[in-house]
Image (spheres, rainbow, N blue to C red):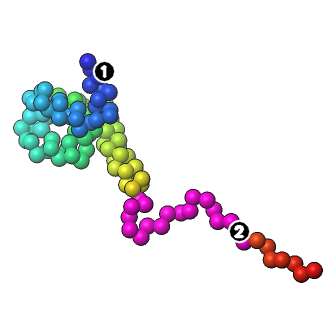
Amino acid sequence: MPCLFALMAGFFPRLATMLLWLARPTMFSAAFNGSWLWPILGILFLPFTTLMFVILWSPTGLTGGDWLWLILAVLLDLMHYSSTAYSNRNQIPGYKAAPATPPTPPPPPAQPM
């Protein structure tokens, strides 16, 4: 079962976070000090980071290697947003993409005989 949850979290982090919140609401209330605003914002904007924070959180806080995993989750979220923006760049009005093939040079001028 943990492997199935890890697979789901990798492909659908928002769904995994919501299911974790429904299954273990005390984890979320402890990790976010009883606030419901931060988890909602995290699920909307930084789903991997929110999921990783809740999984790694302990009563003593985050320690040593936990910060590495949290930073990797932030980078993963940021890479997702940058790739989405890059792939949708052609939908911006007035954006002119570089041509897919280089233009062919004009033929040389004809030599008089």
Label 2 vs label 1, nearer the camera: 2
Contact (Cβ within 8 Å) of mark 2 with mark 1: no
Q: Is residue 92 visible?
A: yes
Q: Tag 1: Cα neighbours inside 10 Å, few (<14), some, or many (≥20)?
A: few
Asked where in the image residue 74 lies, by quadrant, the reply is: top left
Amino acid on which disc 2 is placed: Pro
Asked where in the image residue 48 lies, by quadrant, the reply is: top left
Front-lying residue, 101 or 86: 101
- Mark 2–mark 1 Cα distance, whole angstroms, equals 57 Å
Front-lying residue, 82 or 64: 82
Q: Is residue 23 above or below residue 93?
A: above
Look at 26% across and 18% down and name the residue there: 1
Q: Which residues are magenta?
A: 89-106
The residue that mark 2 highlights is 105
Residue furthest top in the image: 1
What is the tally of numbered marks visible in this picture?
A: 2
Mark toward the start of the polypeptide (2 vs 1)? 1
Main SS class of the magenta portion in the image: loop
Q: Position of residue 108 (x, y in %)?
A: 79, 73
| Mark 1: secondary structure | helix
Look at 29% across and 22% down and name the residue there: 4
| Mark 2: secondary structure | loop
Front-lying residue, 105 or 24: 105
Look at 6% across and 38% down and name the residue there: 34
The residue that mark 1 highlights is 3
Look at 21% across and 46% down and name the residue there: 44
Q: Is residue 15 above or below residue 88?
A: above
Q: Position of residue 73 (x, y in %)?
A: 31, 38
